[in-house]
Image (cartoon, rainbow, N blue to C red):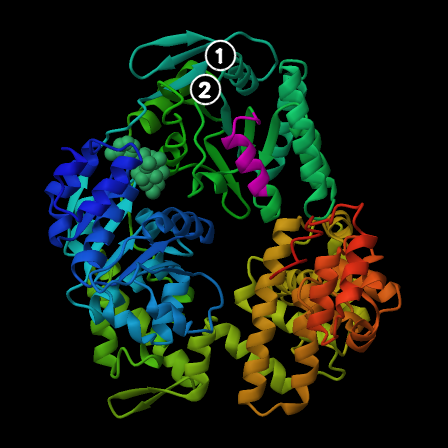
Amino acid sequence: MRIRDLAIDPRVIQLLEEEGLDQLYPPQEDAVKAGILDGKNLVLASPTASGKTLVAELCILKHVLERNGKVIYLAPLRALASEKYREFQRYSSIKKPNGERLHIGISTGDFDSIDPWLGRNDVILSTNEKADSLLRHKAPWMSELSLVVADEVHLLTEHARGPTLEVVLTRLNEINPKIQVLALSATVSNAQEVGEWLHAGSVTTEWRPVPLREGIYHEGQVQFSDGTSRVIEGLTNSPVLDIALDVVGAGGQALVFTETRRSAVEMGRKAALALKGRLSKPEERSLALLSERVLSSGEKTSLSEALAGQVLTGAAFHHAGLTGVHRETVEDSFRSGKVKILAATPTLAAGVNLPARTVVISSYERYEAGFGRYPITVLEYKQFCGRAGRPRYDKFGESLLIARNADEAEWLMENYIIAKPEKLWSKLAVEKVLRPHVLSTVAAGYARTEEGLYEFFSRTLYAHQYGPRLIKGKIGDILRFLCNEEMVLMEGKELVATKFGKRVSELYIDPESAVTLRDGLYNRAKRLTDFSLLHLIAKTPDLAPRPRPRGKETESLGLLAVQHGGEFTFDVPEEFEDPMAYEEFLSELKAAQVLEDWIEEHTEDEILEARKVEPGDLLRLVQGSEWLVFAAQELAKLFGHKDLLPPLGVLRVRVSKGVKPELVKLVGLEGVGRVRARMLFASGLKTIEDIKERSLTELTSISTIGPALAKRIKEKAGGLIKADEWERAKSAKASEVEQQVMLTDYEDTE
Ligand SMILES: Nc1ncnc2c1ncn2[C@@H]1O[C@H](COP(=O)(O)OP(=O)(O)OP(=O)(O)O)[C@@H](O)[C@H]1O
Ligand SMILES: [Mg+2]
């Protein structure tokens, strides 16, 4: 089927043809034949890069240009929502029938905001969590939606985040009974069942734009499932490296999935050594620049130095311990072909568009504390394979497992290569996960009686798969908890959320966390300090998973507990009476300790060395804590703890920016993060007043502050800038290039 034969606005056809598209890919044709342009619901399960986005786009444009519709596009990750937002911009010049251009909006941030401007858009990109929070706030436009696109819908089966998507889809269907649903995924084996739940048809295809060969390496040879084989030269003592070098030798790139972060770094290090001297001079020069970029963006830590070192010879690692800037740099340089071998943990397999000719799965096992080792799921394996083969660059992609012996090779063939991915199963009925959704259903008025509550949950995927009875018992237990804690009142048959319940639902925190915060603020402590509050935040289940104390730390954390005796808002558990609770307490203590380091202006590298917490994890801890301090502030207001508002207010800024109290005002200025604020302070610019009064030239004398930034800072401080002062500042710095480097992730946040 040709694009030009589609029953869609000719301007869309023209735009797509100008982009060089002519024929629909087979899965796209199947989707059109299944009626997506006529408003039919569909679950489309089709391999990576088989063009699912275009299916969504056609459907979206049909709604917006021809049906006066409104669309929400749900993505599991912020990065993915932003990627789609950028891609969709190309349609924004097309005018709607009313003469206005098409409006595309994105909202992935603040969970306590209704973002009123969002409703003006025709297409809204959002993460699943943000969509859930908008539903809790009852954003009015949510009931005007005519199409929901759920991307990467296999997320439904994930323990922590699947249930949010499940509840969002159930609720959108409930408030918009006519809404069209388009669910997309590369790996669903029970698309039909998920389709039945969504009242949707299903299309499953195995078509790929670049053919995939799946194979197993054993003793110097790769055996592919299509019967072909290839000999791999043994250059090192690692099969994974041998394969990667073979691919690079043939002009390709290799993506190696490793089990742990540490093994990703180690594999990258070995790959860097093995690649030395294999690349051309121009390639080496561009890698040297890349390496410098790694060092100059973000804070310098031993982790970023390791990365910069590997990049020099064309290797890199990628894992969640890296901060955003570094991850993006790695992704960009792999995409552009500069980095030849990339060792990554599985986080990369989810979402990020990063194809490679060859994917090597260095281990098919995972280790999890408490569970031991277990093999990865077929679904995960297929997700890894999905990254193999770069459209337009490679004739084929290949994905390889490593077998230690012939037996294992056979086992891998049977259990992964020819196996079908597991079915998607709902994970909604876990109490911790279900609790906030039960509260929000009552608090936002989506159910007004116990019956209504059961009825809502009887429409979820969980009830579809397991029957409604199982979940009913769980809901009953949760309702009792919510009533006991006075978040919900039962008046006869009626369920009403209290102010507390409503606020907790809107704040998007676990009701259990809210109880901890409420009780902690009420209990106080003998001596209530910032550390008390940090520990209180760390104690909430919302902060989990917390950084784990390492072996030797147990003792020092025990000492820390003694030092801070009298500052805890809850009784400290006895080590010998209740060892489990004590262990939990130590992990809370460690989180509080890391946060304290952070607000005492320890560098990322110091925190990495002393506490073994990597920058990416530190950032997540900081963001989670900032939100919880905000939640504590809101609950303190609600429960009348006026005296706690000022310390919580200061603490919130300190946690968010990582500064001591004296810098709290300065970091409030746009473009001033912890590093610049400290420099300003050290040069005697200690208050907003100081900045207002000093000349621009004095500001620009501070490193990393150029005239433009100086002007912005001074203006924000309320200072007046005369024309000649501006000229002077510019010419004083004219010979220097204004440094626009981001000092840290936290700097320059506008
Ligand atoms: N009909 C077509 N003709 C040529 N190229 C196409 C066509 N449809 C899509 N493409 C291109 O294919 C590429 C991959 O498509 P897309 O991102 O939609 O994959 P996907 O199916 O969503 O995969 P994933 O599961 O990884 O998200 C895009 O670069 C897109 O421009
Ligand atoms: Mg996609």
Quickly name the residue at label 1. Answer: 250
Q: Position of residue 28 (x, y in %)?
A: 20, 38
Q: Residues within 10 Å of mark 1 (few under 14, many from 20)?
A: few
Which quadrant is the N terminus positioned in? top left
Q: Classify mark 1: helix, strand or loop.
A: loop
Q: Nearer the viewer, residue 136 or 576?
A: 136
Give left or right: position of 619 versus 377: right
Q: CA distance from mark 2 to mark 1?
A: 23 Å
**Residue placed under numbered mark 2 in the picture:** 403
Q: Residue furthest front?
A: 724
Mark 2 or 1: the one toward you: 1
Residue for point 12% across, 38% down: 5
Is 669 rendered above or below residue 45? Answer: below
Q: Is residue 565 above or below residue 215?
A: below
State which region is magenta: 327-339
Q: In the rendered structure, which disc, 2 or 1, sits on the residue that comes first in sequence? A: 1
User: Which mark, by number, is residue 233?
Assistant: none
Q: Is residue 63 left or right of residue 279?
A: left
Magenta-drawn stretch, dominant element (helix, strand or loop): helix
- Assess whether residue 328 is covered by the magenta stretch: yes
Percent position (x, y) of residue 22? 22, 31
Q: Residue at x 68, y 23 (%)?
A: 285
Residue 588 at x, y = what percent? 65, 64
> Which quadrant contains ligand 1?
top left
